[in-house]
Amino acid sequence: MRRALRWLMAVCVVVATSTAALAADLRPLVQALGSGGYSGTEKALAQLSEAGDPAAVPVIEALQAGDLYVRKADGTVVVARKAGDAFTLTDPLTRAALGDAPAAAVEKIRINNSLRRAISASLGALTLMSPDTGVRRSAADAVFKSRDAQALETLNAAIAKEQDKSVRAAMEQARAAILLTGEAASKMSDAEIQSATDTLAARGDRDALVLLNMVAGSGASDVTKRSAAAAVSTLEQKLAFWAALQNLWYGLSLGSVLLLAAIGLAVTFGVMGVINMAHGEMVMIGAYTTFLVQEFFRAHAPGLFDLSILVALPAAFIVSGGVGIIIERSVIRWLYGRPLETLLATWGLSLALQQAVRSIFGPTNREVGAPSWMSGAFELGGLTITYGRLWIVIFAFAVFGALLVALKRTWFGLSIRAVTQNRPMANAMGIRTARVDALTFGLGSGIAGLAGVALSQIDNVSPNLGQGYIIDSFMVVVFGGVGNLWGTLVGALTLGSINKFLEPYAGAVLGKILVLIFIILFIQRRPRGLFALKGRAVEA
Amino acid sequence: MRTKQLTSSFGISALAGLAMGAMASFAMPAQAADDTIKVGILHSLSGTMAISETTLKDVMLMLIDEQNKKGGLLGKKLEPVVVDPASNWPLFAEKARELISKDKVSAVFGCWTSVSRKSVLPVFEELNNILFYPVQYEGEESSRNVFYTGAAPNQQAIPAVDYLMQKEKVQRWVLAGTDYVYPRTTNKILEAYLKGKGVKPEDIMINYTPFGHSDWQSIVADIKKFGSAGKKTAVVSTINGDANVPFYKELGNQGVKAQDIPVVAFSVGEEELAGIDTKPLLGHLAAWNYFQSVETPANSDFIKAWKTYTKNDKRVTNDPMEAHYIGFNMWVKAVEAAGTTEPDKVIDAMVGVSVPNLTGGYSAMLPNHHITKPVLIGEVQENGQFDVVSKTSGLVPGDEWSDYLPDSKDLIADWRKPMSCGNFNVKTGKCGGKGS
């Protein structure tokens, strides 16, 4: 064992000395990274990437990751990684171990935004020839962003060698970007300019638009400007089309959030007729349950963190539903048929629940993490769709479908409908109406808890979480038609879309006011909402 | 099992909360008035603003506790009187009146939002007491009874915009804010300032959102669209409170990187970042007069004391806490100089008092009741802290009446005798001008 270790160390030393010989000329440049503050580091970085040696890549990557430090004793630039309280030091070029150092003995080389830009530019230029396709692609994108004229030579060589079609396209776009914005533009022929703007226009995204706009507004030649301006207008038309679609998606996404928040209320207020001002707090309790479940996972099973949301769903349903049943049994059942008193009592309850949560968890926001399958975004044509929103849309419709089935196709649903439509008759038929009342209220609250799990992903988990949704929920239920689940669905999606279409033109504040005015006018004409219930049950 | 525990602890804490509330309001008058000096703490402990203000109540209790351990003030112990105005603006005025008339406090440390300050202002002027206001605000005000230890616009907003203009070469500006007085006034000042610097009107986009706005999808998309006009674009955010978390989440989701469109915020500090995953926010900026990451002996002592006091190693410190630290120490020094806690004498003794701040310098109280502060620009790091990327070389004196607004550019405040005026018009030479 010990012999093997010695062998290994010997090999390490040999490897280290051989790379040291190669890296000798980079050494003073790396050393310069550690002095002169931000501007000094930036200057040294520029020289380092000018040297064009791929050996500098790990050093620059360490700088980007914030692992590059200066040893205070002798001013040497080292890579330091935290190990407990101390740092383990290695040489940035040879990767030879340099022992441990306490935190006070080293000072981090700090980077700011302009350095971050310079780092990704030089990493891009240095990794264009990398054997890894993914690295080459991001290198091409980095060069596209930096438009560093020095990278042009390498870029041309890389394009000639590139086999992968999409990577080559990215590289050609980067080349076009450099050509159009650099000094070379004045020497190019009209045809070359045209082909460069075409390459950019083919890219078709906002980054291309930024660049073309820049070219169109710059001091370039008239031909360049004209061809860029033409490309801008076609690109803008295309982007406007996608922007409209994107708005539709935003509307759907906001609508599904409204649907989730309102659907529990559609049960307690719509079906039972209880004006439940504490509905938002049920949502909040659901969100805090998610937080507790996640804390449990963080402490006991960090590897299964991605599943925490799935566990939180039933937990939140049970906790919020349980609180709902307790509220119904202790407060609301004495107030049936007295809407004003119910309103006041549940409002008081909502304040009490908020303050209780504030006393237990503190007034500050709690961090609820997103599982990996809910974070990030993907592109669909010109649409950017975030996974989190997509799952919420799917989840909202799933909850809606499940509730619909529960109310229409199960014995429990039948009892609920029987009790709400004709209480004495249901009683006479042997349905325990008191129990059905409690369970119905519990169901509505439980669904609010489910909404809380979803909202914890996009909003603050704070004691005030519920307040933001209570007005919107009532608006959706009233607009859609009290007592009709389909009305709630249509109402939520309509209000969501209207809101999102108004926002870009009227602003968020005025948009909200306009929606409210629209609802007031609508209720004047149709007091029972979009889908009014008809039949004897309504008159009763 | 877990559920059962949860519900039972719900009940107990709710009861405990009620009992504590009752004690706080009934226990006070029992003390004899003369053997202690009473200090009022007027911060919301419930309602929307509790998220920010509870911390300030705690830091005041800690500072008073430390002062008492050092032997109190004028040979007497300090006694904190905590009231809860519950994020309810009229209640702020009521509670302020209660503190001054009933509890006979010598000074009050409190308020967060501008509307709460405006609501208590007449009470402090009528009953002649002292308020220390620790939060950055829109300026355009100076009262004899209020000491503004937070930043005026020229100590936060203007230097931040200057930094973006010079270092990041920003030419296009999105001014995004929550729809109330602080963002509106600050944006008005910034708009005038930017136009004075030659920024064209079409390069400025102003956007307001309601309190607690949670769906930022289309606004962030708008910002991206505004930023694709070929000029370097930045967002100046006066978005307040809870709305910041979904805003930053959406920025991260839509991939708005600080290298492309940096966001500089005036109301986002360490406390606000505590609830967010900061990795996608790397490099976005905030302008304050203090960051927890500042390395000075005074600051590391303060952080250590705070963590020990709260018995929580994860608690962060922020700018308004430092403002209370400065304000409290100034008040202590002024009371010692005046030899009494009588408001009139303390107010006169306050001007010119200078105490160490936590960023390695001294802050002094100016005749306009604002203080001198350094301005720091910080970039968000992965650990939720800020890395200072720019610091003004000297201290910036707080300017109460903005020089960039036509209504207030001729006004100054000087509470020293014989001028003793909060809105002196230098053009007409009379006290009492526009604004106020």
Image (spheres, rainbow, N blue to C red):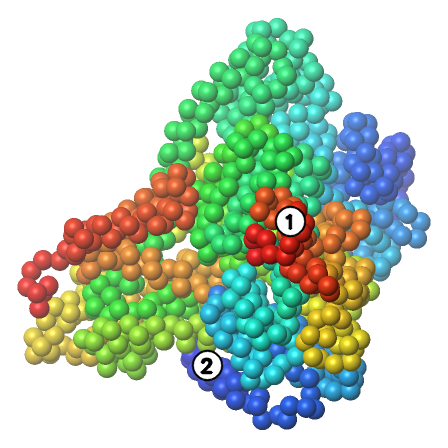
> Which callout, 1 or 2, points to the residue nearer the camera?
1
Task: Say if residue A187 shows up in the picture.
Answer: yes
Q: Is residue A302 above or below residue A61?
A: below
SS at circle 2: helix
* In front of the other: B65 or A362: B65
> How many neighbours does mark 2 have within 10 angstroms: few (below 14), some (14-19), or many (20 or more)?
many
Residue that carries the numbered disc 2 in the rendered image: B14
Could you say which is closer to the camera, residue B157 or residue A278? B157
Q: Is residue A87 left or right of residue B199?
A: right
Q: Position of residue A105 (x, y in %)?
A: 87, 57
Indicate the position of residue A278 as horizontal and vertical percent values. 35, 70
The image quadrant of residue B195 is top right
Q: Mark 1 points at which residue?
A: B428
Question: Label 1 is placed on what type of residue?
Answer: Thr
Q: Pointer 1 and pointer 2: residues touching (CB < 8 Å)? A: no
Q: Answer whether residue A439 is visible to the viewer in this image.
A: no
Left or right side of A387 for A405: left
Chain letter of the residue beneath label 1 in the structure image:
B
Residue at image position (30%, 63%) is A264
Give how far apart the Cα atoms at labels 1 and 2 are: 59 Å
Residue at mark 2: chain: B
Amino acid type assigned to the residue bearing label 2 in the image: Ala
Residue A113, horizontal then vertical, whole percent: 69, 41
